[in-house]
Amino acid sequence: MKKQYIAGNWKMNLTLDEARDIARKLCDGIADAETVDIGVFPPFVYLKDVCDILSDSKVFVGAQNMNMEQHGAFTGEVSGGMLKDIGCTHVIIGHSERRTIYKETDSEINSKLKAALLNDLQPILCVGESQDERDADKTREVVEKQLSGGLLDLKPEQVEGLTIAYEPVWAIGTGKTATPEQANEVHAFIRNTLRSKYGDDTAQSIRIQYGGSVNAGNAKELLGQPEIDGALVGGASLDPNSFLDIVSKAASFS
Ligand code: 13P
């Protein structure tokens, strides 16, 4: 069985004190870090503090976004090298909020993914359809396009061990989670798409997280699906008890 991977995307939330407090609680509360991979993704300005608190723990720390360039005149941006420099090991790329609000394209996401790998950061590539796209029966088409655009020109050895997060946009922050069967069906489609591009071994090495209104109440059913290898948790990751509860649900499937 694959090791489950539970990641908390804190988005643009929390004060510095709150962020440090959650990090300390995770540090104390994580008993399942042997069997589950756990990561937190704080806002940029809290990353160094959270990295320092979690440096002796097994909890990964990553950023929610990064720039595709290494350095230069890009006001307001943060590079992969800078993230690496302060102790980050992971990064979220292509979150739907960046795709929809900041109009990130598949081509930019592809460049960011390559820059993450170049800087030895482990990316989570997010994909997922909107409500309108699902209603129009376009889920597979949309996800396939995001996958092929996001992974363009990556070699099988670069894709090996990657993490993909399937986050249906209509389930994010809405309390309206995909049913375990709906999620599993799209995960199986993603796996098959990866298999046809890179072969079975590589496809099996890729963990596919589900994201969208995951909480302690629904995590067990979702994580129990054969194609779901973890969760990318938003709102519920802001409460360390809920997050730890989700981690312990994952531990029973790792
Ligand atoms: P919620 O868990 O708040 O729905 O957010 C999901 C998400 O976008 C994680 O990246």
Image (tube, rainbow, N blue to C red):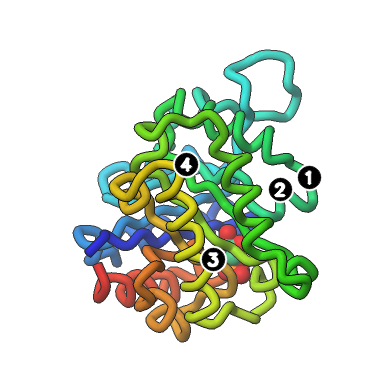
Q: CA distance from mark 4 to mark 2?
A: 15 Å
Looking at the rendering, in which quadrant would you find the C terminus?
bottom left
* Residue corresponding to mark 4: 123
Among numbered discs 3 and 1, the one appearing first in the sequence: 1
* Residue corresponding to mark 1: 102
The type of residue carrying mark 3 is Gly
Image marks 3 and 2: residues in contact by CB distance under 8 Å: no
| Residue 138, x across and y down, in percent | 71, 65
User: What residue occupies the far top of the structure in this picture?
Assistant: 72
Image marks 2 and 1: residues in contact by CB distance under 8 Å: yes
Q: Is mark 3 within 8 Å of ligand 1?
A: yes
Give the total of numbered labels: 4
| Residue 2, x across and y down, in percent | 26, 60
**Label 4 crowd bin: few (<14), some (14–19), many (20+), radius 10 Å:** many
| Residue 65, numbered circle | none
Q: Locate residue 161 relative to residue 240 in the image: left or right.
A: left
